[in-house]
């Protein structure tokens, strides 16, 4: 018997609620809209129309994927970050609101730089670099990640947001010295893997079972990437340039100490919406010219 979109929605919502999905109403609407080939607004306008068999079957298959634990973002193939639609696949972490303070902090740092050169290191989907590139029309952005699969997603997002003329994605390992062509950046933005080995086991199954381990594992104490970036990548910053990190809960003090030990100054912090120290940033000291350079 044919069902209306509203009947399908109510059934999907009930199934998701019984499965313990927190945002069951929102997710039911998103899954049904995707199965029907509509936007959310188009679906709402058709809620009391009858759905065809094809739309019902497609929505049911999407629902089963969600009930199996697959995150909604991977099912949809896209997710919103800083007001931008970002393409996502299981090769990259799902962009999160916790990372948005890094973007608005970087925008504030760069507000007086005319044509900033930005490095999005450990870029994943490229959400940080795309948000900066879109909001800084004269910026040039280099995206870098060790994962070729992640860089493939990054390139799609660069194209989606029409940044091709000002952006390039290059494979590089944050745990090794940078390629010679990466030089003279005004800002390095880095959201590295920062989950300590022991903590990986306690992550929510939706993260542990679905999101890429390569983008989560921060080594024994969660600080491996911060140490390496500060040791190996400081040289690609121009004098007076800035580095800005996302950090895990409880890591801010350790990352501050690493920045100070690496010779950075003008340290600052930005909190996330829960009041957690989420973003740590600092400036590279300007070199003092030698007597021979002054002559």
Image: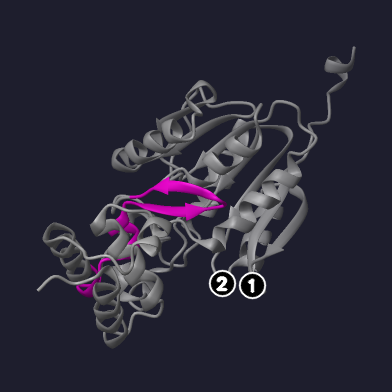
The magenta stretch is 66-88
The reply to whether residue 59 is in sight is yes
Identify the residue at image location x=70%, y=51%: 105
Residue 81 part of the magenta-drawn span: yes
Residue 97 part of the magenta-drawn span: no
In the rendered image, the vertical position of residue 243 relative to residue 289, given as above or below: below
Residue marked by disc 2? 249
Q: How far across and down, in percent of the image, does residue 223 sit?
A: 51, 60
The residue positioned farthest toward the right in the image shown:
295
Give the quarter of the image for residue 35.
bottom left
In the rendered image, the vertical position of residue 222 relative to residue 233, given as above or below: below
Mark 1 vs mark 2: in front? 1
Q: How far across and down, in percent of the image, does residue 195 sit?
A: 44, 66
Quarter of the picture containing the N terminus is bottom left
Q: Nearer the viewer, residue 2 or 197?
A: 2
Q: Say which element carries label 1.
A: loop
Q: How far across and down, in percent of the image, does residue 139 sit?
A: 64, 29
Q: Say which element carries label 2.
A: loop
239 displayed left or right of 30: right
State the colouring used for the structure image.
one colour
The residue positioned farthest toward the top in the image shown:
295
Which of the labelled discs sits on residue 276, or is there none?
Answer: 1
Identify the residue at image location x=35%, y=76%: 204
In the rendered image, the vertical position of residue 63 relative to residue 87, given as above or below: below
The residue positioned farthest toward the front in the image shown:
49
Quarter of the picture containing the C terminus is top right
The reply to whether residue 177 is in sight is no
Q: Nearer the viewer, residue 171 or 220?
A: 171
């Amino acid at each position: 018997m044919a069902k209306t979109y509203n009947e399908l929605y109510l059934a999907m919502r009930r199934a998701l609620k019984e499965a313990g999905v927190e945002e069951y109403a929102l997710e039911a609407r998103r899954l049904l809209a995707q199965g029907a080939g509509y936007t959310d607004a188009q679906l709402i306008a058709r809620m009391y129309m009858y759905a065809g068999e094809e739309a019902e079957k497609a929505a049911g298959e999407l629902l089963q994927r969600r009930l199996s634990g697959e995150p909604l973002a991977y099912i949809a193939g896209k997710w919103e970050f800083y007001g931008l639609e970002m393409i996502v696949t299981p090769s990259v972490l799902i962009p999160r609101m916790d990372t948005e303070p890094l973007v608005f902090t970087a925008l504030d740092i760069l507000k007086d730089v005319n044509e900033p050169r930005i490095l999005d290191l450990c870029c994943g989907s490229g959400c940080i670099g795309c948000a900066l590139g879109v909001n800084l029309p004269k910026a040039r952005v280099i995206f870098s990640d060790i994962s070729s699969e992640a860089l493939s997603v990054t390139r799609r997002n660069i194209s989606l947001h029409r940044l091709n003329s000002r952006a390039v994605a290059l494979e590089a390992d944050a745990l090794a010295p940078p390629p010679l062509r990466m030089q003279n950046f005004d800002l390095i933005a880095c959201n590295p893997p920062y989950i300590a080995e022991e903590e990986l086991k306690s992550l929510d199954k939706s993260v542990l079972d679905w999101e890429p381990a390569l983008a989560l594992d921060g080594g024994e104490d969660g600080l491996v990437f911060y140490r390496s970036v500060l040791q190996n990548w400081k040289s690609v910053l121009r004098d007076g340039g800035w580095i800005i990190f996302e950090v895990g809960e409880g890591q801010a003090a350790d990352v501050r100490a690493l920045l100070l030990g690496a010779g950075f100054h003008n340290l600052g912090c930005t909190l996330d919406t829960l009041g957690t120290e989420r973003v740590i940033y600092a400036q590279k000291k300007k070199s003092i010219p030698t007597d021979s350079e002054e002559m």
